[in-house]
């Protein structure tokens, strides 16, 4: 048997790189675009509104996820979408210097967002098909952590690169154009790597269809089965509201760090933001994710749920401190961001594992896509008004509002039902 046709491979060979490939475009679209537009002079209100609309492909991906499930293999969709993502990034690089850069780059980000959302459907389904359940639990921290590696590479490394170019004679426009060209080359390299390295697991085939159903009826049936799950009301509330506060905080974090002291921000340079929020913070996020996944695999999701809920939400008060004190010591800023991100990474492990639990069953790929789509809606709506809210309240009152916004996260955690042994390694 040729190596390219191996039905299984060591998960360490492909799980980390697959989730880097999943994370890079998402981080570029949702977070790095915020820094890009802030540096190019776009207002906080427009940044929050238009970049939040880019969540829409992830929100509506459940509507086309059944087609990904029914036609071709997950492996096929992964490889093709990675090629499209790389091409879209190259187009972003070429359109940044244009006079109507905002419209053109947004159009390219939209194409990339649809490709990335489709890639997510296939990659998450491939993960569940290629690994047995106990490996899924053990690797949930690994996949989350390497997703954070992608965050470091994109939100940290690329922002630092752009900042470095800005400080060394390149205009802001051309510094960012070069930066996006670099990441386009990187994504093309991932496409080539996965075309050869991803295994061909036996379960990775088009989902079986009921011979008595047409394709449209099968499509509707797979979606309907999800909404007939037990305790679905609490499940939907959890997906929508667990990250209500974080959705707003994340969208305004980079503008807060970049805005001058006179406007209530911390006045950091582009490079300093790349290091503090995109590197130090993301490393802390990775540590939290790895620890969370490991502990869930040892004692189960139910045992750790409330500890993770507290870890997710309580550290948000750190941004209240930053907005009132406006410290100029970069060490204090880095430490504060690291603590908040460590808690976020630890708490998000519970969310990730809960989505996997809810998606178990015959249509796990589609149902996981529905779960992540609802999650994206829960991120999109709060993020859309966060820029407007911040500009009206100022950073100090905005972060007090964020603390109040954590209350729904605690309430929905009390509603969900979890098998005491779920996620625990047998």
Image (cartoon, rainbow, N blue to C red):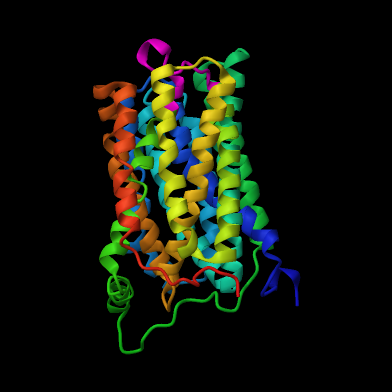
Question: Looking at the image, is 161 positioned above or below residue 232?
Answer: above
**Residue sitting nearer the eye, 227 or 329:** 329
Give the x, y percent position of residue 396: 33, 23
Residue at x 56% of width, y 16% of height: 329
Side (left or right) of 270 relative to 366: right
Would residue 65 be counted in the magenta stretch?
Answer: no
Direction bottom: furthest residue:
212
Q: Tell me the magenta residue range.
A: 254-271
Residue at x 39% of width, y 83% of height: 209
Question: Looking at the image, is 12 positioned above or below residue 309?
Answer: below
Question: The N terminus appears in which quarter of the rendering?
Answer: bottom right
Give the x, y percent position of residue 188: 61, 47
Give the x, y percent position of residue 313: 40, 43
Give the x, y percent position of residue 289: 56, 50
Would residue 261 be counted in the magenta stretch?
Answer: yes
- Residue 79 occupies which quadrant of the picture? bottom right
**Residue sitting nearer the eye, 147 or 411:** 411
């Amino acid at each position: 048997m040729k190596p390219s046709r191996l039905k299984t491979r060591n998960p360490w060979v492909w799980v980390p790189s697959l989730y880097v490939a999943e994370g890079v475009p998402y981080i570029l679209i949702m977070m790095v675009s915020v820094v890009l537009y802030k540096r190019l002079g776009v207002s906080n209100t427009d940044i929050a509104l238009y970049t939040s609309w880019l969540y829409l492909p992830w929100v509506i991906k459940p509507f086309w996820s059944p087609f990904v499930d029914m036609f071709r293999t997950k492996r096929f969709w992964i490889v093709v979408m990675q090629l499209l993502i790389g091409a879209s990034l190259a187009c972003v690089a070429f359109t940044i210097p244009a006079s109507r850069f905002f419209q053109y780059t947004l159009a390219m980000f939209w194409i990339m967002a649809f490709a990335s959302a489709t890639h997510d459907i296939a990659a998450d389904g491939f993960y569940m098909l290629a690994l047995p359940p106990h490996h899924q639990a053990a690797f949930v921290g690994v996949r989350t952590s390497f997703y954070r590696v992608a965050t470091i590479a994109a939100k940290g490394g690329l922002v630092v690169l752009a900042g470095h170019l800005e400080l060394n004679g390149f205009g802001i426009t051309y510094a960012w154009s070069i930066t996006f060209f670099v990441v386009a080359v990187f994504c093309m390299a991932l496409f080539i790597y996965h075309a050869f390295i991803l295994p061909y697991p036996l379960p990775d085939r088009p989902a079986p269809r009921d011979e008595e159903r047409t394709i449209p009826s099968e499509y509707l049936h797979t979606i309907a089965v999800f909404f007939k799950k037990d305790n679905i009301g609490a499940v939907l509330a959890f997906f929508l509201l667990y990250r209500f506060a974080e959705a707003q905080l994340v969208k305004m974090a980079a503008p807060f760090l970049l805005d001058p002291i006179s406007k209530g921000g911390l006045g950091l340079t582009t490079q300093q933001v790349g290091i503090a929020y995109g590197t130090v913070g993301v490393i802390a996020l990775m540590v939290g994710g790895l620890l969370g996944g490991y502990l869930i695999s040892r004692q189960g999701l139910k045992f750790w749920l409330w500890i993770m809920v507290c870890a997710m939400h309580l550290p948000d008060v750190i941004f209240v401190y930053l907005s009132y004190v406006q410290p100029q010591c970069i060490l204090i800023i880095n430490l504060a961001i690291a603590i908040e991100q460590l808690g976020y990474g630890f708490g998000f492990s519970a969310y990730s594992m809960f989505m996997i639990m809810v998606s178990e069953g015959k249509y796990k790929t589609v149902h996981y896509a529905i779960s992540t789509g609802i999650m994206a809606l829960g991120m999109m709506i709060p993020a859309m008004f966060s820029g407007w809210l911040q500009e009206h309240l100022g950073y100090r009152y905005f972060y007090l509002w964020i603390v109040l916004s954590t209350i729904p996260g605690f309430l929905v955690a009390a509603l969900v039902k979890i098998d005491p042994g779920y996620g625990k390694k047998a």
